Image: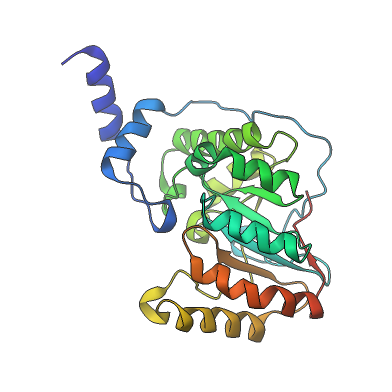
Amino acid sequence: MTTRRRALAIAAAGVITTVTGCADQSRSDVLHRLAVHPSPSPSPSPAHSFGPSHALTRGDGPLGSVTQTGSDAVALTFDDGPDPVTTPALLDLLGQYNIKATFNLVGWRARDNAPVVRRMGAGGHTICNHSWQHLMDLGKHPLSYQKWDLANTTAAINRAAPDSPVRYMRAPGGNFTPQLVDLIRAFGMTPLFWDVDPRDWDSAHFGHGPSMVSHIVSTVQAHVKPGRIVLSHDCKHPDTIAAYATLLPWLKDRYRLISLPV
């Protein structure tokens, strides 16, 4: 085995690749990405510097994560993208109603769909870090990997949308740990949670098509209140996009809708 092949084999063996949802990748794709990024950097730093932050800094969620907007406004947040099909469809809808939202992006998807990220930034949406490959146990990985993960996700977003500061990080599944939260804050970001969760990812319980659309619409309408942060998923979730075709005008008639401040 050549030195290069041996190094890649060691890298592949040393990284746990348990991923879920839209961020899921095939084994061959994971190994390919490990070949591109074979090991974590021991002391990464954010790729860009921005001016003073206006972001929310602390909330009443797990380990001080933010769950509300701090005002009477409602924030719609969308996770796991960008997707080259469903995310632009959602951006079209948001543009139709002149609504700004918040997008929590998976790093390798931001890298591979840079024009979509660029469009988010140009549209005035808030862009956040949602980890490199959506490891549900990210906070249990070595600190060196966590640093690499957060730094490279932010760097991918910065390359695509250089004028959009990344001020928030939402851990996959909301699974924050004290070490991960300390690192998020060290990177100048705020841990972001949510207050309203329609579980639009849970097709095992709510089905697909009209049943899921109806569930999302009714859940958001029942639970949204002034100041709430709503969680949804845009990546490969066409039922979510269909639900927001109904929800956006309903919400706009009743609430002030904002992207999270940066």
Q: Quadrant of the N terminus?
A: top left
Please tell me which residue is depicted at 74% across the width and 64% down the height of the picture.
96
Q: Is residue 197 above or below residue 58?
A: below
Is residue 173 at all visible to an observer of this figure?
yes
Residue 52: quadrant of the picture = top right
Q: Is residue 144 left or right of residue 162?
A: left
Instruction: Return the residue nearer the eye: 211 or 66.
Output: 211
Residue 88: image location, x then y, percent: 60, 54
Instruction: Return the residue nearer the eye: 100 or 187.
Output: 100
Please tell me which residue is depicted at 52% across the width and 83% down the height of the picture.
215
Please tell me which residue is depicted at 32% across the width and 43% down the height of the picture.
16
Q: Is residue 141 above or below residue 77?
A: above
Instruction: Return the residue nearer the eye: 230 or 187.
Output: 230
Q: Is residue 19 left or right of residue 116?
A: left
Is residue 38 at all visible to an observer of this figure?
no
Please tell me which residue is depicted at 73% across the width and 40% down the height of the picture.
164
Residue 210: image location, x then y, percent: 48, 82
Residue 258: quadrant of the picture = bottom right
